Image: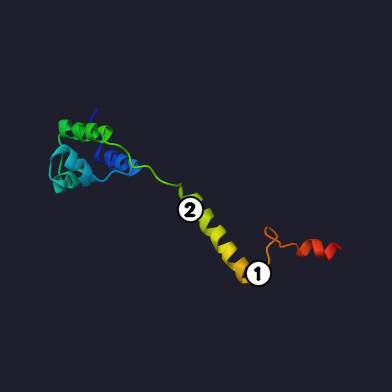
């Protein structure tokens, strides 16, 4: 089965590998690889298979944190910033005011 260029592009994106890095690994010109992957130039079955093989040999770039973790960290930092300024009250980080009211 011949790999589809769109599937190869998606695999590159999923693994965090650039087409330029694959081209360097294969010893070909990056623009040639880009033209084949974008569909502007037809690639032979053998060529497409060699691209897939090159991708499988390359290490993947790992993401440091999933995007939702980054968003949670930004929300937490914003929360703490406004708490320190005293611009709003927070049930999460009440500074004992709640306990004083009960007494």
Categorize mark 1 by other alpha carbons within 10 Å: few (<14), some (14-19), many (20+): few
Distance between mark 2 and mark 1 Cα atoms: 23 Å
State the image coordinates of residue 88 (x, y, percent, origin top left).
65, 69
Q: Position of residue 75 (x, y in %)?
A: 55, 59
Name the N-terminal-most of marks 2 and 1.
2
Q: Are marks 2 and 1 in contact (CB under 8 Å)?
A: no
In the current view of this chain or complex, which residue is farthest to the right? 103
Vertical comparison of 89 with 68: above or below: below
Task: Work out which quarter of the rendered image holds the N terminus and state it.
Answer: top left
Using the image, determine if residue 7 lies above or below residue 94: above
* Front in this rendered view, residue 1 or 92: 92
Q: Position of residue 64 (x, y in %)?
A: 42, 46
The residue located at (27%, 39%) in the rendering is: 8
Residue drawn at point x = 18 percent, y = 42 percent: 23
> The C terminus is located in which quarter?
bottom right
Q: Residue at x 25, y 32 (%)?
A: 57
Q: Is 90 left, or right, of 29 in this rendering?
A: right
Q: Which element type, helix, strand or loop, lies under badge 2?
A: helix
Q: In the rendered image, which residue does mark 1 sit on?
A: 88
Q: Which residue is mark 2?
A: 70
Q: Is residue 60 left or right of residue 35?
A: right
Badge 2 density bin: few <14, some 14–19, many ≥20, Cα 10 Å: few
User: Horizontal and vertical percent for residue 48?
Assistant: 19, 35
């Amino acid at each position: 089965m011949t790999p589809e260029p769109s599937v190869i592009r998606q695999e590159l994106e999923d693994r965090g590998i650039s087409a330029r890095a694959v081209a360097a690994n294969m010893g070909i010109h990056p623009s040639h690889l880009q033209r084949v992957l974008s569909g502007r130039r037809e690639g032979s079955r053998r060529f497409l298979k060699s691209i897939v093989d090159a991708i499988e040999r390359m290490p993947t770039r790992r993401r440091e944190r999933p995007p939702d973790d980054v968003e949670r960290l930004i929300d937490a930092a914003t929360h703490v910033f406004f708490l320190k300024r005293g611009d709003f009250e927070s049930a999460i980080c009440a500074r004992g005011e709640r306990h004083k009211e009960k007494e």
